[in-house]
Image (spheres, grey):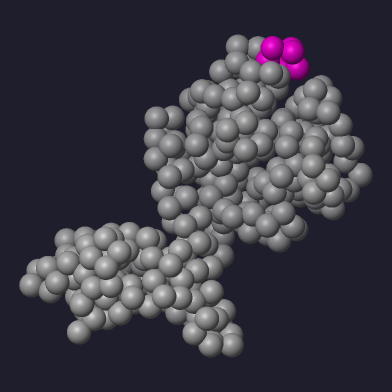
Amino acid sequence: MSTVQQPDPRDRPARLTVGVVGAGRVGPALAASLQLAGHRPVAVSGVSDASRRRAAAMLPDVPLVPPAEVMARADLVLLTVPDDALPGLVEGLAETEAVRPGQLLVHTSGRYGARVLDPALRAGALPLALHPAMTFTGSAVDVQRLAGCSFGVTAPDELRLAAEALVIEMGGEPEWIAEENRPLYHAALALGANHLVTLVAQSLELLRAAGVEAPDRMLGPLLGAALDNALRSGDAALTGPVARGDAGTVAVHVSELRKHAPQTVDGYLAMARATADRALASGLLKPELAEDLLGVLAKGTDGAEGDVR
């Protein structure tokens, strides 16, 4: 449950008009959240049919217009496009004089800090980087999930309070990230969240192949407990055959995966090696058992099935 107290919109009469450039999964959710705080979405742009449908569903009665018109109508503009598209978008908006002096320009990229907005800054915009550390579905549930969500915040010192205030109005919790640390910050989130989805999806597929009728019900409690333990205890939460040094069991795993799901072998081996390193460093894996285990993992990398004993 969030400890953040959201302001009553009635107590804050000076509201901003809000525009969205890029109606992916993130932009409409943030605009809808700002609307709940009393701000007024006035324009949104989207290219694909899915983006347009999403905008219509989450921001009803807000007109769909080209990006330049979004810029012309809004005091606060959310630039919610893919990371790789952001620099070109900012440069294009600045070159076409779409940016207005005093306009709040907010991007939601985890990779970039405020400097990517320098072309707009030179045109008089106020640059903010507000990245919600959350996965988005593109539906109304995203607005609810923003309550208590951490945001990676980067902005010039004179705009720090404004950036943090916007995050708090959306029900989030601001976390200041230095400009030079943005790529590392984003890599950490991708490692934890994006790769988790891949691992869980692979596990579901393997359980189905093993004949489990409800793999989601089987994994739910296990993964929930593992996540909770990891957040509480870090490496001390490691369990399983790698942490125990059960080289024979790991060799069997590799052999079975090569037979039934060869596309998962490289990922299994990479994660097993990383787990072994952490278990050894933390004292969970005994050095005398680590040698056999690492030998099995090396054979697995070479494509051999290893000694299953």
Q: Residue at x 74, y 13 (%)?
A: 96
Residue 47: horizontal and vertical position, in percent?
79, 37
Q: Which residues are magenta?
A: 94-100
Asked if 66 appears above or below 58 in the picture, the reply is above
Residue 260: horizontal and vertical position, in percent?
45, 75
**Is the N terminus in the top left, top right, bottom left or bottom right quadrant?**
bottom right
Q: Residue at x 52, y 40 (%)?
A: 110
The number of numbered discs placed on residues in the rendered structure image is 0
For residue 242, which quarter of the picture?
bottom left
Q: Viewed as shown, does residue 136 lie left or right of 203? A: right
Residue 52: horizontal and vertical position, in percent?
83, 44
Q: Would you say residue 196 is visible in this rendering?
A: yes
Q: Viewed as shown, does residue 207 lie left or right of 91? A: left
Asked if 218 appears above or below 167 in the picture, the reply is below
The front one of 81 and 271 is 271
> Does the magenta stretch mainly form a helix, a strand or a loop?
loop
Residue 209 is one of the magenta-drawn residues: no
The front one of 27 and 309 is 309
Residue 98 is one of the magenta-drawn residues: yes
Asked if 135 appears above or below 236 in the picture, the reply is above
Residue 27: horizontal and vertical position, in percent?
71, 43
**Is the C terminus in the top left, top right, bottom left or bottom right quadrant?**
bottom left
